[in-house]
Amino acid sequence: MPELPEVETTRRGVEPHVVGRRIVELALHEPRLRWRVPGTLPAKLAGQRIRLAGRRAKYLLIELEGGTLLLHLGMSGSLRVLPATTPRIAHDHFDLVLDSGQSLRFNDPRRFGSLHYTTEALEKHPLLKRLAPEPFDDAFDGDYLYKVTRKRNVAIKQLLMNSMLVVGVGNIYASEALFRARIRPRRPARTLSRAEAGKLVRAIRTVLSLAIRTGGTTLRDYVGADGNPGYFRQKLFVYERAGKPCRRCRTPIRQITQGQRSTYYCPQCQR
Ligand SMILES: [Zn+2]
């Protein structure tokens, strides 16, 4: 599933190809995505110029002159920038054809992705208005994390993955950040000290930044070519390393299940 770093890398990859371009047409081949794309949408977009390519949580925000497109990659979605005349392949659901002769093409085998268009203020949009801070926002700092965990008995790893607290920390990055902050994933959130909350915020930013940086090189090959961005190969300390020696202390890494997701940690380094 594309996580925040993959979405941010996609944003950076498509940005130079779309900003400043005019939309010639939205060619809708399959409107039945997670939510049905209205048949009236192509007429609203035709002729509009693209101002910005932004992101909020895992939504790509393509700002036009008269509104904003909200695009979610779902479980299996990907975007390619290619010549508009390129023949479609299976699961290519729409093309945003640009005046450059290129097309922003959306492919999604499982169709959990979505496309919305709004002319309202973004912070009031039902999909965005309840989202927690971004991991790189100034609002997400040690004081914030300390404060919002005080009355929470739930395990810190599960709380991180709950996007009511911070957006975009998926399963891989939650395990990796907790390792870097030396915090056991099963600790009740309220037991974190102020210092640990600060360390955890820094660790989350580090693992996400590394993933975005690694992804940048992957995406340069992918935009305009055929490929799939796939998962980014940052050096993982614990994720999917059950039984292997900790890279810091050689103790075998443990695997547990929390909320039906696998969690990995070092019983020696993490307290
Ligand atoms: Zn260790």
Image (tube, rainbow, N blue to C red):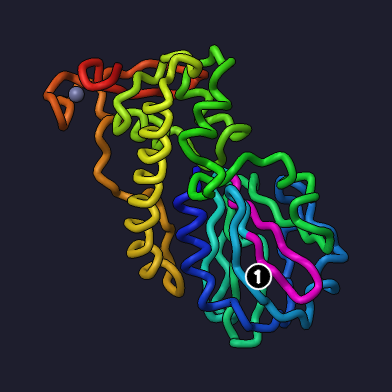
Residue 61 image offset from top left, x and y in percent: 65, 61
Can residue 91 be seen in the rendering of this structure? no
Is-magenta flag for residue 70?
A: yes
Q: Which residues are magenta?
A: 61-74
Identified at 49% across, 18% down, the residue is: 189
Question: What kind of element bears circle 1?
Answer: strand
Quadrant containing ligand 1 reads top left
Instruction: Decide if residue 142 is on the left or right side of residue 54.
Output: left
Residue closer to the observer: 112 or 197: 197
Which residue carries the number 1 mark?
A: 95
Can residue 195 be seen in the rendering of this structure? yes
Is-magenta flag for residue 69?
A: yes
Residue 236 image offset from top left, x and y in percent: 27, 39
Residue 55 image offset from top left, x and y in percent: 59, 57
Identified at 52% across, 41% down, the residue is: 140
Q: Is residue 162 above or below residue 67?
A: above
Amino acid type of the residue tagged 1 in the rendering: Asp
Identified at 66% across, 76% down, the residue is: 51
The image quarter containing residue 196 is: top left
Residue closer to the observer: 123 or 93: 123
Instruction: Decide if residue 252 is on the left or right side of residue 138.
Output: left
The image quarter containing residue 46 is: bottom right
Identified at 64% across, 49% down, the residue is: 113
* Magenta-drawn stretch, dominant element (helix, strand or loop): strand
Q: Is residue 174 above or below residue 234?
A: above
Instruction: Decide if residue 194 is on the left or right side of residue 47.
Output: left
Residue 262 image offset from top left, x and y in percent: 41, 23
